[in-house]
Amino acid sequence: MTNNATEPTKPDGPEVAIVVRYQAMVGKGDEVAALLARHTAATRAEPGNLDFVALRGTEDPDSFVLYERYESTDAFKAHQASPHFEGIAVAQIRPLLAERTLHFCQVVEPDGSLWMRSTRLPS
């Protein structure tokens, strides 16, 4: 299966926070994990990246959760335009996925404001 979905609209605001869920095709978890390790290292080196954590499910080794934070929408756009995003995440990881879901979030502020937008992308 391929992931040819249009990316959801990103929220406006000073910081971009994202939770991404990957469900790899059965038995492809080791391959996705190896690619994510490379992608994580490159993403953490980006100047606008505040945090990037890739987690692998212990009960389902073909499931992953990514937690990403960027200092601005521009920093997130720069991430999406980076060679490692296109070369690893798009070209190598996405073809191994059965499902990919993105949740664009706003960090909870001291005044309690919070909103989340969720988009399920077809595989």
Image (tube, rainbow, N blue to C red):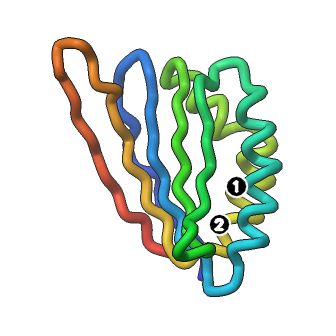
**Mark earlier in primary sequence (1, 2):** 1
Q: Percent position (x, y) of residue 69?
A: 52, 30
**Drawn side of residue 37 relative to residue 11, left or right:** right
At x 78%, y 51%, the residue is: 37
Query: Residue 8: percent from the left, percent from the top?
Result: 40, 49
Crowd tier of the residue under label 2, counting other residues whose Cα lies within 10 Å: few below 14, some 14–19, many 20 or above = many
On the rendered structure, is 33 left or right of 53?
right
Task: Tell me the element at label 1.
Answer: helix
Task: Indicate the amino acid at tag 1.
Answer: Ala
Residue drawn at x 43%, y 65% is 121
Q: Residue furthest bottom?
A: 26
Mark 1–mark 2 CB contact (< 8 Å): yes
The residue that label 2 is drawn on is 94
What secondary structure is found at the residue carrying circle 2?
A: helix
Q: Which residue is mark 1?
A: 89
Q: Please give the count of numbered marks on the rendered protein.
A: 2
The Cα atoms of the two marked residues, 1 and 2, are separated by 6 Å
Above or below, comparing residue 21 to residue 66 in the picture:
below
